Image (cartoon, rainbow, N blue to C red):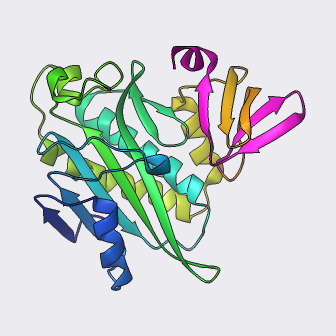
Amino acid sequence: MKIGDRVHFLPTCTSTNAVLKDIAAQGASEGTVVIAEEQTSGKGRYQRHWFSSRGKGLYISVLLRPPRSEISLLTLSAGLAVAEALLDVFGVKVCLKWPNDLLWEGKKLGGILSESSFIGNQLNYVVVGIGLNINHSEEDFPASIRETAISLKQIKHKDINKDLFLLNLWKTLEIWYDFYVQKKTGLIISSFMESSCYSPGQELIALTDKGAVLGTFKGLDQQGGVVLETRDGSCTFFSVDIKSLQEAKEN
C-alpha cells in the first residue's frame, strides 16, 4: 500500500470525505486519495462547517482499510503525521488539541475528520479527512473565525507551495499509519502527549450530552480516550469536546 499513488483531483466537491466514501464503496484500494480545490460542504466533528475557500486551503481525504478498529488512535496518528510534515517542510511546530485539531499559538491551522464504515461488526474502511489553511490572508477568512483561524501564509509571511508539502505528507502518513497497524500504541500516545495542547494536571472541561464535566487531565488511555479525574472518580471520554478553563471562559 502506497498513500498518494492514486489521487483524484477535483476542482470542487461537497466534501472530499463524501466523494471518497463513494469511491471506497466501489472497492477502491487502500491509499487512494481525493484532493479538492474547493469544498462546498466541508465539515468537521459533529457536522460543523469547515470553511473551504477555493484554492486557499488543502482539502484531502485518504482511504485506509486497517486491520484494527480503534479509530480514535488512527485520528491521533493522522494528526501526528500532519504535524511532522509541517515541521519537516516549513519548520512550523503545532500543538495537537485532542482529538483532531492542529493549533499554532492558539489558532486553528487545520483539523482531522475520520469516518468509518462497517459491514456487520467488521471494519470495512476508514476515510481520513485532512483540512489545512494554506494561503489564506486574514481577510480571506469569514469574520466569525478571523480571530481563531490562521494559515501557513500568515505564519511564514509568504505564499506556500502545496505540492512540496504533499510529497512529505504521504511519507509521514505512511509512517504513522504503519505504527498504528503494528499496534505501537505506546509510541502514538506518548508522541501525542508530547505535542498536546493540554498538560497532565491541567483542569479541563468535557462537554458531554449530559452537561459539562470538570476534571484534572491525567492523559490518554490505550484506545486514545481522554482520562479526567473528576469528583466522581476517573472518567474516560471519546466523543466529547474538551476545553481548558480559559477556553471555556472565552466561549
Quick check: 175 left or right of 71?
left
Q: Is residue 249 visible?
A: yes
Residue 156, given in percent of the width and then of the height, sits at 19, 22
Of the 4 image quadrants, the one containing the N terminus is: bottom left
- Front residue of 48/200: it is 48
Residue farthest right in this picture: 232
For residue 155, what is the image quadrant?
Answer: top left
Residue sitting at x 24%, y 29%: 142
Residue 145, given in percent of the width and then of the height, sits at 32, 26
Residue 104, given in percent of the width and then of the height, sits at 37, 24
Quick check: 24 left or right of 246?
left
Is-magenta flag for residue 242? yes
Residue sitting at x 16%, y 29%: 140
Quick check: 234 left or right of 73?
right
Residue 75, given in percent of the width and then of the height, sits at 50, 52
Q: Is residue 40 above or below residue 248?
A: below
Disc count in the image? 0
Q: Which residues are magenta?
A: 224-251
Residue sitting at x 56%, y 30%: 194
Q: Is residue 99 above or below residue 10?
A: above
Quick check: 110 left or right of 139?
right
Residue sitting at x 10%, y 58%: 11
Is-magenta flag for residue 190? no
Q: Is residue 1 visible?
A: no
